[in-house]
Image: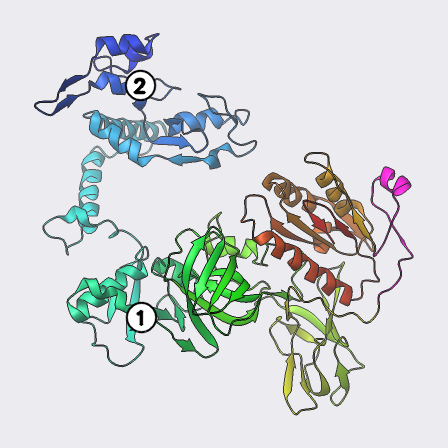
Amino acid sequence: MFQYDEIGPSAVASSSSSSKVKDEFPIKMDLAKGIYEVPLQRMAPFMMCSICSGYLIDACTVVDCCRTFCKSCLLKYFDDGENTDCPQCASMIHQSHPTQYVSMDRTMQEIIYKMIPGLKRMERKERLEFIKQEKRSKGEEVDDNEEERQRQERLLEKERNTNTCFKGNPCRSHHRGDAQVVVQLLPGQRGFPRPLRPIIRLSQMATINTIKRYLAMSMWKKVSRYNEIDLFCNNELMGKDFSMRFIQLTRCRDQPKTKPVRLYYKKHIERMRFGDKAYGFVFGVSGPIVTAEKMSGAAMYELVRVGHDELVGEIIRLEGDYATIQVYEETSGVTVGDPVLRTGEPLSVELGPGIMNAIFDGVQRPLKDIADATHSIYIPKGISIHSLNRNTLWNYTINKHVQVGSHVKGGDVIGVVDESVLIKHKILVPPNIAGNVTFQTPSGQYTVSDTLLELETTDGQVEKVSMYQVWPVRIPRPVAEKLAGNNPLLCGQRVLDALFCCVQGGTCAIPGAFGCGKTVISQSLSKYSNSDAIIYVGCGERGNEMSEVLRDFPELTIEVDGVATSIMERTVLVANTSNMPVAAREASIYTGGEAFILKLNREFKGRLLFTQYLESFIY
């Protein structure tokens, strides 16, 4: 940080009134000549750090209040751990991690370096002197030519990052220093001329639109014809805004990075079919409601993928050739004419080992797996990840009463998986099939997608049974018998146990206004009740309340055979907070309901809590 007496920061900082600065340094304007001069002294207060009263160095901006400070000053301010508010406006940044809500403001820093001559050079010189002094104090060897060597390295770096394709203006290269990806362009149908270079290397930030423009220029010498091309990866239409990094993460995750990404180019779809998949087109967009045309043959509550980002949606109304779609994600960027992919299936959830000790959103997307895959705190639009991990191995023990030749039907137990020390997960035959066993795997370690049993039905078809089942959220799971409740539910709150007695397997409601304590009671029930499984559906909850659940629950333990175990082993969270799309809240209730019925089918002795109230649900 520097203070220049001759151009103003120290002088301006000592002024008690901004009007005095305006009077001393007026703005010169000559509209006839087009001259508009602003003295540097007038701009100095906007380029200064309020902590050190010097010009900003490594400018960092607080996200909430947009106040800018020097990076070193801000880190020193937060270093003691007691300061969690903004140094200038005193507004709370974050209770425990304020540095995570501060971002580098490189644009501001570049403006300051351009407006203050020599500031960048002097800052670099001061840093080199500081490094030399530190080395001398430690007795290390000091290189006197280090400044010249660093200058040469910067020149070489600039030369490496210069795109030779733009010889006239090398500054037009913005992504030469990005991570690169190799793409192989293959024809998906006949009638296309081959591009000049079918294998290209480009930045990971390049989009599908960029590749389409390259193909149009390479094949037809007309960039304007790029709209006649569609690009596909693994038989999936790629959206025009898809970046190569997003495609690598979501479509080519299992492919080695040494192999090129294969993209197939075809004619622009007007009405195309790929197997059982058909496309319609967006006719209108109104918030989360999308109207699509050319949707004849679609069914009510059919799952569709809207737009190039493939947003999750459900058909809620059919009228002639038009369908009204409820989209469960943000619809910004969806325009008229975008494709609507019909899946031919209802909105469904995956039921099996791995549900417990997990957190999902309203349509059963695993939030932790998404964070690990994208390395981001945000959920990318249209991302598709399996709800249950396909790589986790589970210890599977077969049912000795089920052997090859046995006749089994829906609901029969074929084996048990030790999901945790609290949960014995019984693997059942799906309720809609029955037949004779023709193949059975021995006990061992398997993934949820491995085949455990094969049945031959009465019509001669072979059905495969694995650990998990896919079930529509709007269809209730069938049950053989509803048992009467005969055991009390101990809530962990004496006032509830004494005055408002509940029964295991019953239904309870907690109506109330905002802020009257409904969430506190629900969390207390989840922590201390004598239930075998907790399915916590935070529908419309505040984000900090869900984060409190994630923070407190892993620290709570219960004793099982003398061993302390976290209650997260019996808990699953469905997070649909108030800042998520409103349309997804109904789906979250169905998602939690299916998990509840699944656990009933696993024979938890009816000892499950089903509590319902206006903001959240606990099953």
For label 1, count other residues whose C-alpha is less than 10 Å away and answer few (under 14), some (14-19) or many (20+): few
Q: Is residue 50 above or below residue 490?
A: above
Position of 312 compared to 498: left or right? left
Nearer the observer, disc 2 or disc 1?
A: 1
Image coords of residue 238 (percent x, y): 37, 65
Q: Is residue 581 visible?
A: yes
The residue shown at (19%, 20%) is: 38
Position of 318 compared to 508: left or right? left
The reply to whether dot 2 and dot 1 touch (C-beta < 8 Å) is no
Q: Which residues are magenta?
A: 482-505
Q: Which quadrant holds residue 459?
A: bottom right
> How has the structure been colored for display?
rainbow
Type of amino acid at the residue the image marks with label 1: His
Q: Which quadrant holds residue 211?
A: bottom left
Q: Tell me the quarter of the image containing the C terminus.
A: bottom right
Which residue is farthest left? 33
Q: What mark, if any, has residue 268 been given in the picture?
A: 1
Q: Is residue 359 visible?
A: no
Report which residue position mark 2 lands on: 45
Image coords of residue 275 (percent x, y): 45, 79
